Image (spheres, helix red, strand yellow):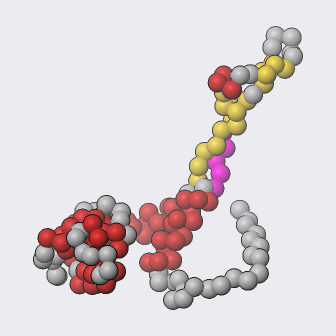
Amino acid sequence: MKKPKTKRQRAFFKNIAEGMTKRQAAIKAGYSEKSANHSADQNAENCKDYWKKALDAAGATDALICQTITEGLKATKVVGYLQSVNKDGDGQLTKVKPDQCVSNEFVEVADYSTRAKFVDIALKLKAAYPATKVEITQPIRLAIDE
């Protein structure tokens, strides 16, 4: 297992762990903007085993990562419907001020924004993205069944 040897390599991995892109992590670690992409790719390639073992040691095993991605692909959120009218004692409907609205009905719905992020992660891990960009010239129609 190759460990990051230099101060810049250690800083690069720290930056990656904080959620930066490889390019951002390389620049912040002290690599020049001109060589950031190459340096980032080289560091990542040279230390793959180190990175995997560091994740495993932190509890982020392959099984846990797969489980988390699978859960993310099924993400939902709870939405409340605000009641903006009330019935008074006579059965008359009266409008309620926005700051007095209450939610008394909740429903769980698919969280497509979160699901899309996990689809992106899953496709990257499976190397399922095309090597080159695909140009779409016609409108796309999606049918979603639940």
Tell whether 46 sits left or right of 76. left
Residue 107 counted in the magenta span = yes
**Looking at the picture, how far across and down is residue 133, in whole percent?**
57, 85
Residue drawn where x is 52% and y is 71% of the image: 120
Residue drawn where x is 18% and y is 72% of the image: 8
Q: Determine the image quadrant of residue 87.
A: top right
Tell whether 145 sits left or right of 50. right
Check the picture and name the quadrant holding the C terminus. bottom right
Camera-side residue of 118 and 27: 27
Q: Can residue 44 be seen in this view?
A: no
Of all residues shown, which one is farthest toward the top? Answer: 89
Q: Is residue 7 visible?
A: yes
Check the picture and name the quadrant holding the N terminus. bottom left
**Looking at the picture, how far across and down is residue 84, in whole percent?**
75, 28
Residue 36 counted in the magenta span = no
Camera-side residue of 28 and 2: 28
Residue drawn where x is 59% and y is 59% of the image: 113
Span highlighted in magenta in the image: 106-110
Would you place residue 86 above or below residue 73 in this image?
Answer: above
Of all residues shown, which one is farthest toward the bottom? Answer: 131
**Looking at the picture, how far across and down is residue 109, in whole percent?**
65, 51
Q: Determine the image quadrant of residue 145.
A: bottom right
Q: Determine the image quadrant of residue 138.
A: bottom right
**Looking at the picture, how far across and down is residue 96, in whole percent?**
74, 22
Give the tally of numbered discs. 0
Would you place residue 73 above or below residue 41 in this image?
Answer: above
Magenta span: chief secondary structure: strand
